Structures are given as structure tokens and as C-alpha cells.
Image (cartoon, helix red, strand yellow):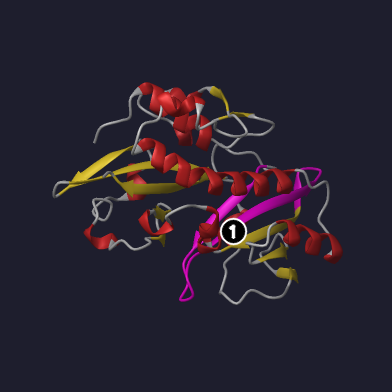
Amino acid sequence: MRTFPRLITLALAALLAVSAAGCAQVHNAYKSSKNFYHTHINRPEKLNMDTDEVLLKSPEQTLVKRVMPIDEELSRLEKALDALASPPDAEAAGAFLSRFPWLTGLYMVAPDGTLGAAVPGAPLKQLDFSPLLTVQPKTLPRDLRSSVQDSPFGPEILVARPFLQEDQLVVILVAAFDFRALLPFTTAPGDLVVRSPETLLWSGDIDYASTPMAGIDWKKHLESHTDGIISKDKKSMLWVTRHIAETPIVFAAFME
């Protein structure tokens, strides 16, 4: 394993770190060997590929260009969920979905995990909302929460916005989506591999089992790494993480 040069690491981190109003405090889950992710970083709303080209050379530049449109969509969703002052009614939920047509649906979940209102209807996939009811370490009760769940119909990513009253959870609003719905936003999706610590989300035209990624315990690996290059049988892949709430998502591509 070897890490990116510092300038490339800074540029990728600036692109992929989740922020609010252009700036965010990155907690320990983002730690790297250089402790860069323990600091506050400024995230440009859009990476200027013309001026930043001197910092990002292929294949780094190629990976960033592929990930950036997906990152922008996810950031829009996170900001929209954060901006909600109260749980949406049916009309507001419909308007929310129209802004994010790649979402599967919106679900109102009670503190005991019971599914309430669902727009546009009950989920086709069997979803477990219980992981979203617990405040994860190093997060606040009002922070967004996330879960990645596999199913026979493909993995589903859940992003939850908790609503509290006097520090007590009243309801959570869950936005669910299949990662494959974001693929139209990127170029050459067949060359991209995407996964969470436990679940393969997308492998494109690539035989995942034959890649350098296949032999890694990603849950353990992501405890101490956020990006890098992995190699096996003379094949190398460049990878970087992008968090959805507390869940790290790995984006990777072969180095040509």
C-alpha cells in the first residue's frame, strides 16, 4: 500500500469530504496517517478541473472526474435533508422526490422502528430501519445517519434525518436509493467499482473477484486508511473514500 502525494491527497479530500456551507469538521472516521482528516477543511462547491489539472494527473484526475458528479448529487441530498425544519407532509415529500428523482422513496420511521408514511409507497426491498435508530460513536443525535443493506434486488443505501424534541427522538425521515440510480451522472461507469465496508454496490464491467480489492477486509482496512493504491498480479487500482453520514463509500478504478 502506498498513499497519494500530499497535493493529490489534499485535492481529493477537498472534493470528497462532506461539508456544510462549504466547510466541515471531519471526525476520526476520516483519519489518515498524516492526520489531515482530523482538521477543518474547505471544500470547493465545484472542483475546477482546468486550474487543478496541474495537481491531478491521470489516473487521479480520471477518478476524480468520475466521482465528482456523484459527490455533487449526494451533497445536494445531504444539504436538503439537513435544511428540513420539520418532517415533510405528503405534498412536501413528493416535491422533495421530484428534486431527487434517483431516490427510491421517503419513509417516516417511528423511534421503535415501525414504518409509518411512505412516499411513493412501501419499499419493494426488505429494509431494516433499526440501525438508523442508534446514535453512532463520535456523532451527535441530530446528525444524519446512514446504513447500507443488501437484498436480492440489489443493495439499498439509507440516509436518515432524525427529528428530535427536547433531545428525544420523535421520528426519522429516511431517504433510500439504489446506488445504480446515480450511474447516469458519471462517465464510464463500467470502469468504476463502488462498495461500502460490507457490501459491493457496483462493479461495472469488472470481475470484482479478480481485482486487488477482493482480498481486503474493507471494514478493518477503512479504520486506518482513506485512500491509496492497491496492487495484485501486476494490476493496480486507485481508490478513495466518500462518507455518507458515518458510512464510508469506496470508489476505485484500475490504473491504466
| Residue 155 highlighted magenta (yes or no) | yes
Give x and y (percent) for residue 156: 53, 64
Using the rendered view, name the quadrant where residue 5 is placed.
top left
Give x and y (percent) for residue 154: 47, 70
Residue 227 visible (yes or no): no
Q: Is residue 215 above or below residue 180?
A: above
Give x and y (percent) for residue 207: 27, 63
The residue furthest left is 233
**Residue 246 appears left or right of 120:** left
The residue furthest front is 50
The local secondary structure at tag 1 comes to strand
What residue do we see at 52% from left, 30% from top? 14
Q: Magenta segment range?
A: 143-169
Q: What main secondary structure does the magenta stretch of the protein show?
A: strand
What residue do we see at 60% from left, 29% from top? 44
**Residue 22 appears left or right of 41:** right
**Residue 160 appears left or right of 154:** right
**Looking at the image, which is closer to me, 210 or 47?**
47
Q: Which residue is mark 1?
A: 158
Q: Is residue 45 above or below residue 207?
A: above
Instruction: Tell me the quadrant of the picture where the N terminus can be found.
Output: top left
Q: Is residue 227 above or below residue 170?
A: above
What residue do we see at 70% from left, 43% from top? 79
| Residue 39 highlighted magenta (yes or no) | no
